[in-house]
Image (cartoon, rainbow, N blue to C red):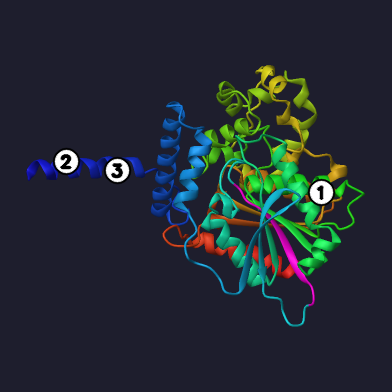
Amino acid sequence: MRASCVLLTALAALAAYYVYIPLPSSVSDPWKLMLLDATFRGAQQVSNLIHYLGLSHHLIALNFIIVSFGKKSAWSSVQVRVTDTDFDGVEVRVFEGSPRPEERLRRSVIYVHGGGWALASASMSRSPSAYYDELCTAMAEELNAVIVSIEYRLVPQVYFPEQIHDVARATKYFLQPKVLQKYSVDPGRIAISGDSAGGNLAAALVQQFTQDDNLRNKLKLQALIYPVLQALDFNTPSYQQNMNTPILPRYVMVKYWVDYFKGNYDFVQAMIVNNHTSLDVEEAAAFRARLNWTSLLPASITKSFAPVVQTTGNARIIREIPQLLDSRSSPLIADPEVLQHLPKTYILTCEHDVLRDDGIMYAKRLESAGVPVTLDHFEDGFHGCMIFTSWPTNFSVGIRTRNSYIKWLDQNL
């Protein structure tokens, strides 16, 4: 009996040691976030073991675990019709809210899910995540809108820029007059939106579409939720402040970038200290001014953080991964002439997120280009919080961010 008690005590202590991480007191529901982070870290470690044993690619294994953990339940809404189909060969899931009696045509949001270009799902054929199903259902119901959730192909099936191509193909198909007519969508009231890596793809697509004179219908709005917008500086104040903050530590984000480009993991540590954009890397020189966060961020954000600019670095990284300097992967470094044609924009950022400053800098650059921007910042938010609104992963900031986001769409779309 005594031995059992000692064993249980030891196991409990080990579990507490694994779960506990120091978190700022201002973050939403810190103990719940610790448990969520521990679950995610455990899934990553299991997927890495599977990869090491040669059973599957670690991202495929991790996605299977995550999608299974967040598998859709019997929860649904009688107000929303859900259909799985494809748009020009790209799988999509369409959520149709009930039209208002006074509206002959409905508004619409094209949604691009996050997950580091490698995780999550929107399609029934791949067991859709309850997180995105519930988000899109809530949007369709509260906005009385048509929500198109795009199931773009993931790493390691494809790599940059194929994800952008998938989103572009599906969106162009949907914007055809005959398709909009089929879904009773107003061609002048269509927005594109996405979170995290999905926000990256949405931002890249809008930049591309504004330069396409062949598109008859244009997107009215873009709404970006804690978007990934650049891969040149991994030492912005938010990267420094939140380097170990769940659920997206800096090391994990850099690995997602390397995976997206099918790059070499040996470069990860060098990229973390900005060796890929050091002063002796001539290819990066033209973009440094566009990422000068000392001028793009307010003093309340920069605080006492100092830029990390290496004099000498590793030019081989950019030679082998030139995609790092491509504005399709890093919309934040786009030319000012491109930015000035972008539509009205909503950007949601979270204080406890390595990507916080990407969004704030993009808002500043868009404002300087004359684009109307709403920057919606949450002091207690963390990366990914908006999809965590249902038990047992329900966070108060998740509910508030979702409500704020949908309210903005309702008022502006």
Q: Which residues are magenta?
A: 104-114
- State whether residue 216 appears in this view: yes
- Distance, label 2 to label 3, CA atoms, is 12 Å
Determine the residue positioned at 35% across, 44% down. 19
- Image quarter in which the N terminus is found: top left
Of the image marks 2 and 1, the number of the one nearer the N terminus: 2
Q: Which residue is mark 3?
A: 15
Residue 355 placed where, x, y %? 61, 44
Residue 373 placed where, x, y %? 75, 56
Q: Predominant secondary structure in magenta?
A: strand
Answer with left or right where residue 390 lies relative to residue 232. left
Q: Which residue is mark 1?
A: 368
Q: Which residue is mark 2?
A: 7
Up-down relation of residue 16 to residue 183 (above or below): above
Q: Closer to us: mark 3 or mark 1?
A: 3
Amino acid type shown at disc 2: Leu
Give the residue at the far bottom of this rendering: 101
- State whether residue 246 appears in this view: no
- Distance, label 3 to label 1, CA atoms, is 50 Å
Residue 94 is a magenta residue: no
Amino acid type shown at disc 3: Ala
Q: Mark 1 falls on what kind of element? A: helix
Closer to the camera in the image, 207 or 121: 121
Q: Mark 3 falls on what kind of element? A: helix
Q: Mark 2 falls on what kind of element? A: helix
Which picture quadrant has residue 280?
Answer: top right
Residue 412 placed where, x, y %? 75, 67
Closer to the camera in the image, 137 or 7: 137
Up-down relation of residue 288 to residue 79 (above or below): above
Amino acid type shown at disc 1: Ser
Determine the residue positioned at 53% across, 64% down. 399
